[in-house]
Each structure stands twice: as structure tokens, then as C-alpha cells.
Amino acid sequence: MSAKKKTKVKKSRKSDQAEAFLMINQVARNARTALSRNLLDLGLYAGQDGVMLALDADDGQTPGAIAASLGVKAPTVTKTIGRLAAQGFLRREGSPDDGRMMLVFLTESGRDQIKSIRKSQRKTEKAAFAGLKKKEVGELLALLSTIDTNILASLRSDFVSTLPRNTANGAVDPMDQISSVVEDEAMDAD
């Protein structure tokens, strides 16, 4: 292959990768917007659904446990819990085992919202995947998983190289910090 053709192939690959990366970001924004609009009809904001679904799976959790399951920081979840409690979807009470610990539960109104949240998710998913075959969705999932793995590996490598030695040797898991920063930014939008 001539040098000119190799250059065109490299430029084309870089151009396709740049376009794909922009498209991934755009799709993520549009998906979030679509889900947010569907949730807004329920009186919920993006991120609040995750807290409620976490409690639906395991009611009576601490804010820290919810935060850990969602990959965000506890103060972010605490703020969201406060808003959901004010709406009557959650209630907080002290732990019977440890009075210092607060547990969060869905209220009946919150339980009623779970079905609506799942319906909103399905509506968003149905719109997003209209016209795609099951096999195509599976292929897309595999490709996105690979891209996500690549990005996380790059973040870990970049982040660990900037940490002081004692931190990089196990005192902090950099991915915990990276994940919580990214998720906190998303949930703070609510």
C-alpha cells in the first residue's frame, strides 16, 4: 500500500473514531434528556429514580449503602433522599440496631411510583431501540462495553500516575474516586 493510501486510511479511522465518540456523547445526552422528561411527568428528576430503584431492590438501606450501590458520594444521595422525602416518596428512621445510623425506606407513595419509573424507563428504551433487532442490540452492548472498559483503563492509568506514592499503593481505589465524581455530577443536576 502506498504511503498516501496509508495516510488516508489512518485519517479515515481517526475521523470515524472522533465521529463515533461525539455520537456516543450525543446519544447519552439525548437518552438522559428523554428519560428525564418521562420522569418529570412523575414529578421526579434524573438520579432520583436510581435511589428509589435501589430501595425497591433492598428497602431500609443507609444513605452510604445507597451511594455505594449507585457509585456516588453519600452527600449527593443524602440531598436526593431529602428531596424525595419531602415529596413523600421516602421516609427516614433510626436503625433499631444502631441509633446513630439512619435507614431509608420507600413509602406507599414511593412504592406506587416504582411501577411508573420502570414504565418510564421502558418507554425511553423502546424509543431508543426502535427498529433494531435483538442481535444488533447485543452487538451494540458488546461494543459499548469494550469502549467503556478501554476508557476506565485509561482513566485508572492516568489517575494512578498522578497520585502520591502512598495513595497509589492501595490506600485509595482511584476508580472509586473517578466513578463517584462522574456520577455526582450527573446526580447533582436533579
Image (cartoon, grey):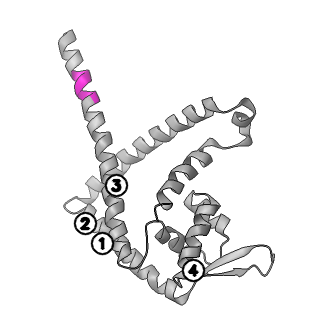
In this picture, which residue range is highlighted in magenta?
9-14
Identify the residue under disc 4.
Answer: 85
| Distance (Cα) linking label 4 and label 1 | 26 Å
Q: In the picture, residue 119 is in which quadrant?
A: bottom left
Local secondary structure at mark 4:
helix
Q: Amino acid at mark 4?
A: Ala
Identify the residue under disc 2.
Answer: 127
The quadrant of the image that shows the N terminus is: top left
Front disc: 4 or 2: 4
Residue 139 visible, this angle: no
Contact? badges 2 and 1 (CB < 8 Å): yes
Question: Which badge, 4 or 1, is on the more N-terminal residue?
Answer: 4
Question: Which badge, 3 or 4, is on the more N-terminal residue?
Answer: 3
Residue in the image at 30% along x and 42% along y: 22
| Left or right, 181 with reference to 127 | right
Residue in the image at 66% along x and 33% along y: 163
Front disc: 3 or 2: 3
Question: Which badge, 3 or 1, is on the more N-terminal residue?
Answer: 3
Q: In the drawing, what numbered circle is on residue 29?
A: 3
| Distance (Cα) linking label 3 and label 1 | 17 Å
Horizontal and vertical percent position of residue 147: 40, 41
Local secondary structure at mark 1:
helix
Contact? badges 3 and 1 (CB < 8 Å): no
